[in-house]
Image (spheres, rainbow, N blue to C red):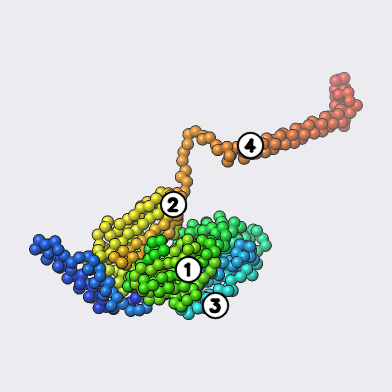
Amino acid sequence: MDRKRLSMRSSHCRFPVLSPWALQCSCVCSLFARIDTRQRRAMRLRGSKRALPKHILIALYTSLVLLVAPVHGDTGGAGLKPDLRLLIDISGSMKTSDPDNLRAPAMEMLVRLLPDGARAGVWLFGEDVKILVPHGEVNAQWRAQARDVIGLIDNSGQRTNIPAALAAATYDFERMDPGYRTSIVLLTDGKVDIAESPMRNASAAREILNERAPALGATGIPVHTIALSEEADWKFLRSLALATSGIAEQAATADALSGIFLQSLELVAPVARVPVAGQSFTIDASVEELTTLVFFSGRNQSIALISPSGRQYNPQGSGGDWFLSEQFALVTIPAPEPGAWRLEAPGAKQVRVTVISNLQIEVDPLPASIAAGRQAELGLRITEQGKAITDPAVLTAFELVVDILAPDGSREIIPVSARYEAPLDGEYRVSVPVFEQAGRYEFMVRLNAQTLQRELPLHVEVMPKPEQATLVTRGDELPEDEYTAPLAAVGAAVCAAGLLVWYILRRRKKRKLEIWERRAKQASGDGTGQFSMSGISAAKEEAGQPLD
């Protein structure tokens, strides 16, 4: 595939996919909106301020959605679908870095949370690479296949062949489908290790950073790296992520893997969720399925979900599809009851409730990593049957907000619906503040309409500006801690080298003088100072005798 064409692909993050809506829904909704608009115009002409209340507009619109929306979701739409390529290190050192093999439950979580219609594949690598889960469309069959082979994740590898793993994950680099947003997640606890020779390993690492990484970055394929343990080559992994506009993470222990995998999923395939207040949340009538993920702070893993009617869902009872690990619990409930739900989990430290709904918003996010000082914008669309809603009467019925949390803890809230007029093409172009401070920024896109609430998380790593060359007219004081000791060592080495050179030259000069003195003595003959050569005598010349 043409790389230039790939490099021009825009990245789209989306809420869970919307079910195919019947054409009559669009027609009826548009007709209803036109009637409301005409009613408001007539009211203004008559001097009356009474118009159809907004809450009635929302209720009728939502009712029409529920009447004609089919049961199952669809991944179609204008946005790009996610494509995740997961690379997992199985080298022997993982016995120490991940003794309890927590990579397996972390992968189980990913398999359950990936949205239908996405693409995904899993590769294991040591001295060579093998396919764990073939790359393909995420559906019930793909999930079942993935769950069957999760137990094959082990520590049997002898080396850490990262180049071969990247090559395997990009097997279709020249023919990638432009309808998908491809991302790679690389988990390792080591460094590039393809041979006994350190020179070959260093050369392979340089080739990745100088050739493969720029090519991936140019085609819009970020590599998100996860360094497990302090033995991992953090400098290499961070450079690889930066070169491809990815994010690098460090996991001090394997216990942190599940949380980091979840964040990687939010980078690759963000899924809509409903806000949780304490341990309560509200499910509206448009939700087809909810998934609750609870991370535990300790060994207390008691958990139950209470529906609005009082029905209890727990791992021991019937209802819901449960998965439990030492770090988290995950349950999926189809066709959840609308209303206020309650979670009973005393040991919970983090709760996330994601939903598959009949309502959808598409987001064109920023790259996962950008340089400080860069101006950027988000593209936001509320869609209907894969097409952006353009009717102002419908758009104004929803409240759209972007909440930005900076690394220093400060927040900035952008009221999109209030600040921007309803766009004629249905796409809001939201100007994002220029980020001067380096670090991790967390975005939360929120959609509200009475009982309907959605939020979608985005993450952006802002890199510091490169140092600018400056002209100085006087020297600055050098920091003692960083330069005094090295400069003293260099000075001592220079002095020692100078003394050695002086001593050698002095010895050579002395030896030359001794040689010349010895030759002079030999040439003088008897040592009287008279110099003679064969047939020639200085004494004869002085006596007036003819020379022989």
Q: Quadrant of residue 337?
A: bottom left
Say which residue label 4 marks.
Answer: 488
- The picture places residue 183, in percent across and down from the top left corner, at 47, 66
Kind of residue indicated by mark 4: Ala
The disc placed on residue 407 is 2
Which residue is identified by label 3?
A: 148
The answer for how far apart the CA atoms under marks 4 and 1 are is 63 Å
Can you identify the residue that label 1 sits on? 303
The answer to whether mark 3 and mark 2 are in CB contact below 8 A is no
Q: Residue at x 52, y 57 (%)?
A: 238
Q: Describe the element under mark 4 as helix, strand or loop.
A: helix
**How dense is the environment of label 4, judged by Cα within 10 Å: few (below 14), some, or many (20 and up)?**
few
Earlier along the polypeptide chain: callout 2 or callout 4? 2
> Which quadrant is home to the N terminus?
bottom left
Find the distance from the CA under tag 3 to the CA under tag 2: 40 Å
x, y percent for residue 308: 36, 71
* Residue depth check, mark 2 versus mark 4: number of the one nearer the observer: 2
**Residue 351, numbered label:** none
Q: Which residue is nearer to you in this view: 2 or 194?
A: 194
Q: Return the residue nearer the eye: 337 or 464.
A: 337
Q: Is disc 1 placed on a helix, strand or loop?
A: loop
- Residue at 18% over, 68% down: 36
Name the kind of residue labelled 3 in the image.
Answer: Asp
| Place of residue 105 in the rendered image (x, y in percent of width and height, measured from the top left) | 54, 69
Q: CA distance from mark 3 to mark 4?
A: 63 Å
Image quadrant in which you'd find residue 441: bottom left
Q: For the residue carrying disc 3, how many other residues have a C-alpha within 10 Å: few (<14), some (14-19), or many (20+)?
A: few
Whichever of labels 3 and 4 marks the residue nearer the N terminus, that label is: 3
Name the N-terminal-most of marks 4 and 1. 1
- Can the viewer see residue 81 in this picture? no
Q: Looking at the image, is mark 3 or mark 2 earlier in the sequence?
A: 3
Sequence-first tag of 1 and 3 = 3
